[in-house]
Image (spheres, rainbow, N blue to C red):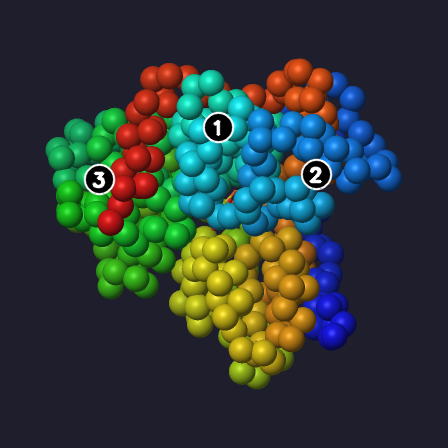
Amino acid sequence: MADVTSTWTEPSNTPLSLLLLGKGTDPASERGVDCPGDLPAPSDPDLVARATAAKAALGDRVFVLGHHYQRDEVIQFADVTGDSFKLAQQAAARPSAEFIVFCGVHFMAESADILTKPDQKVILPDLAAGCSMADMAVLGQVETAWEHFQDLGITDQIVPVTYMNSSADIKGFVGRNKGVVCTSSNAKRALDWSFEQGSKVFFLPDQHLGRNTAVLEMGFDLDDCVLYDPHKPHGGLTDEQLTNARMILWRGHCSVHGRFTLDSVREVRERVPGVNVLVHPECRHDVVKAADYVGSTEYIIKALDAAPSGSAWAVGTELNLVRRLALAHPDKQIMFLDRTVCYCSTMNRIDLPHLVWALEELVAGRVPNVITVDEKTAHEARVALDQMLALP
Ligand code: 13P
Ligand code: SF4
């Protein structure tokens, strides 16, 4: 059997210091960093045994969902792993589980709460596991933009579409304005549906997913897209630009996928002749355009499963997933697209100590870190989520 680590090269440490969550460097982003109760020490040698025992004690009462970007130490306890679309479907398909422990980020847990029954509890093991992209679209800003579109008389033509990576109240806004949620697995289908309902789309909050889907999958011109900057009056756009645009893209992005550059693509092609470049659609447009394949995390996993032995792949998505895939396929040369590390620091907040703590709290009869969306928001957001689940 081949040495499982033989083709994997660990990227070097990033020269930029990442946000040091929990160190008091950015209090505004450190919501919920304090963990109520006694968090086990990361060095505790019994963590795996403790998680196994707590899960066994809870049996069918608990269902653990794990996003592909989670750490291996956490993923080993997931009943189901998936991208955000699959996890939303799976949460909705488990009406008998009393507790859904969501190993992912806050917006995913909110969607799970919306899609599960009222008596089911969704638990996020660390409340600081947020998403910087979701935080880039705040409801008040979005409503201000919509009011301006109303003044221009164009809201009748606009269908709002929000990426799953947005807060519940943004999904609620989209639901009450007859729009749809999408994920990176179904963005084209969501846009096809939207352009049957209207002639323009207001796409939140990931400009890259919106632009990449419209231009590379639907044949739009870059000029059909305008970028709405919520920090500028009227988004920094003229009335004419807004009236003529087919895609109004919110100025948001993923800070993890945004790190891959055209230089990374050029560099790997020079270094590894014949390499296949495979990236997530949250990457920048020039990177996606220069890649050979583009798709959601589920697509990336399937593409590498199906790749022939001996083929070479440079993958532009979160590092936990790329490393896991490289180790699972030692017969293929799978490498990280960037030279330096690129974790999602908020996904990484969920570690084994937090998972053990959450499971043991449940065993003790206490329900920690419950994610609850208020009834009105949940109802409106559900309209947009159900529309997504019903896409042809
Ligand atoms: P998917 O899970 O839809 O591939 O999205 C990736 C991501 O950034 C999740 O936060
Ligand atoms: Fe948000 Fe990007 Fe992290 Fe996904 S990978 S949770 S979009 S910051």
Quadrant assignment for the N terminus: bottom right
> Quadrant location of residue 284?
bottom left
Q: Position of residue 146 (x, y in %)?
A: 25, 31
Pair 1/3: label in front: 1
Give the alpha-carbon distance from disc 1 to disc 2, as whole Å. 26 Å
Q: Earlier in the sequence, mark 2 or mark 3?
A: 3
Q: Is 32 placed above or below 190 here?
A: above
Task: Determine if residue 110 is in view.
Answer: no
Q: Horizontal and vertical percent for residue 234?
A: 29, 35
Q: Secondary structure at mark 2?
A: loop
The three-letter amino acid code for the residue at tag 1 is Ser
SS at circle 3: strand
Q: Which residue matches tag 2? A: 351
Residue pointed to by mark 3: 159
Q: Is residue 224 above or below residue 287?
A: above
Give the crowd class for mark 1: few <14, some 14-19, many >=20 residues within 10 Å.
some
Find residue 140 and report its image quarter: top left
